Amino acid sequence: MPARGTASNRGTASGRLTAAGRLTASGRQFVSGSTPPAVDDMTFLDEQIVSAATAASVTFAAISQAYRHLMIFYVARCDTTVQTLRLQFNADTGSNYDSETFVGAGNSATAGELIGAVSAFAGSVNQSTAAAGAMTCGNFFIPYYTQTTNGKNAVANYVEARAQSSGNIVAGARSGTWRTANAAVTQILLLPSSGNFVQNSRFSLYGIT
């Protein structure tokens, strides 16, 4: 298993504007003479890199409960055709996930849903026939992951070049919901809907205060 990063590898917001009457880095305006609102900090927690030729999945385990939200950034490619990036929370493999997708390519767009599935949508994974080095680049956000009174959601965005031609530069938005409301998220498993991740696919987990 590749070495994981630690919470000591921190990345914090920089370049904040805090002079009276200006905007903060979050775009929120504050009144001259008042205390500016805080800008949430993002802390590097862990990273999974596929170092072998392929990997069926990657897992973030024992996730710290010290933050409000989670964010995962990734670049990924698989050993088959384009696949949906899927996630499971807390090793739950039951039919407890619902998802929605919206994808644009060229001048067209498509939408769809998946109800009562065994995993949720979290993005996309580029195909093996894409140009060398062409990976899906994406991220997804999991708000209030420690709460035990509400279901959990993942909100994702991604872009990928399936081929270097018109109609093959694809961007999408996907979202997934975990129906379980009485559990904090302590583990996240990521996998393509079919096939395997290929070498150098990379997933980085951050906590947001």
Image (cartoon, rainbow, N blue to C red):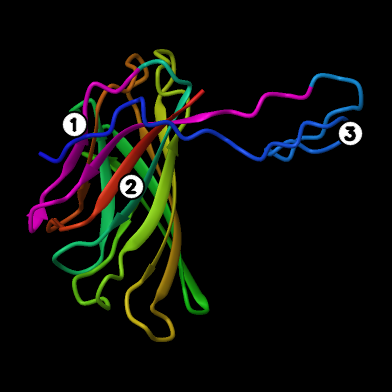
The residue labelled by disc 1 is 94
Instruction: Name the foreground residue: 99 vs 89.
Output: 89
- Residue toward you, 197 or 178: 197
Name the residue: 58% across, 28% down: 40
Q: Give the quadrant of residue 194.
A: bottom left
Q: Specify the amino acid type for callout 3.
A: Gly
Earlier-in-chain disc, 1 versus 2: 1
Marks 2 and 3 close (CB-CB < 8 Å): no
Report the Cα–Cα distance between label 2 and label 3.
Answer: 41 Å
- Give the foreground label among 2 and 3: 3
Circle 1 Cα neighbour tier, 10 Å, few/some/many (<14 / 14–19 / ≥20)? few
Contact between marks 3 and 1 (CB within 8 A): the answer is: no
Residue 84 tag number: none
Part of the protein shown in magenta: 36-64
Residue 21, numbered label: 3
Q: Nearer the viewer, mark 3 or mark 1?
A: 3
Label 1 sits on what residue type?
Answer: Gly
Q: Residue at x 32, y 16 (%)?
A: 183
Label 3, label 1: how far apart the Cα atoms are: 51 Å
Q: Residue 142, percent across and down?
A: 43, 33
Whether residue 84 is situated above or below residue 19 in the rendered picture: below
